[in-house]
Image: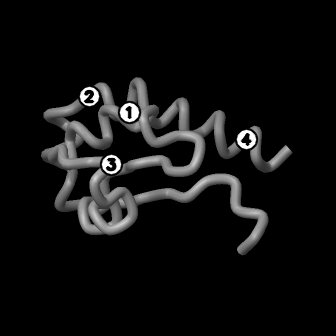
């Protein structure tokens, strides 16, 4: 995929694998600081129903992270 413009790192396993030493933080902090890994990577929590509790404890995710992701995807698709 030579023309990749954004890689979504969904969940802790993907983030640890691809970020290696760039991220030694817990999942919540890595997702909260998603802008540190742009423009190459976008860190996200896994969208599993089991993570509904995580999302309810971290309302900033839907308010701050998702709108940025939507804009990035929209810009790439133009």
Position of residue 35 relative to residue 16, above or below, is above
Residue 62: which numbered mark, if any? Answer: 1
Q: Position of residue 68 (x, y in %)?
A: 54, 31
Please tell me which of labels 3 and 1 falls first in the chain: 3
Answer yes or no: do the residues labelled 2 and 1 have beta carbons within 8 Å? yes
Mark closer to the observer (3, 2): 3
At 42% from the left and 34% from the top, the residue drawn is 36
Badge 4 or badge 2: first in the primary sequence? 2
Q: According to the image, label 2 marks what residue?
A: 59
Looking at the image, is mark 4 or mark 3 nearer the viewer?
3
Q: Secondary structure at mark 2?
A: loop
Crowd tier of the residue under label 3, counting other residues whose Cα lies within 10 Å: few below 14, some 14–19, many 20 or above: few
Place residue 75 in its image quadrant. top right
Q: Which residue is mark 4?
A: 74
- From the image, tell me which residue sits under label 3: 22
For marks 3 and 2, the one nearer the N-term is: 3
Residue 25 image point, x, y percent: 18, 44
Mark 4 neighbour class, 10 Å CA radius: few under 14, some 14 to 19, many 20 or more: few
Q: Indicate the position of residue 24 as horizontal and vertical percent values.
A: 19, 48
Which tag is nearer the camera, tag 4 or tag 2? 4
Distance from disc 4 to disc 2, alpha carbons, whole Å, reads: 23 Å
Q: Residue furthest right?
A: 78
Query: Which is more toward the observer, 55 or 31?
Result: 31
Residue 74, above or below 46: above
Give the CA distance from mark 3 to mark 2.
Answer: 25 Å
Helix, strand or loop status at disc 1: helix
Q: Crowdedness of circle 1 by 10 Å Cα count: few (<14), some, many (20+)? A: few
Distance from Cα at disc 4 to Cα at disc 1: 17 Å
């Amino acid at each position: 995929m030579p023309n990749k413009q954004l890689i979504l790192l969904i969940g802790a396993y993907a983030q640890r694998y691809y970020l290696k030493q760039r991220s030694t933080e817990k999942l919540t902090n890595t997702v909260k600081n998603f802008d540190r890994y742009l423009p190459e990577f976008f860190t996200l929590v896994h969208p599993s129903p089991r993570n509904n509790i995580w999302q309810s404890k971290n309302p900033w995710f839907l308010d701050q992270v998702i709108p940025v992701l939507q804009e990035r995807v929209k810009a790439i698709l133009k």
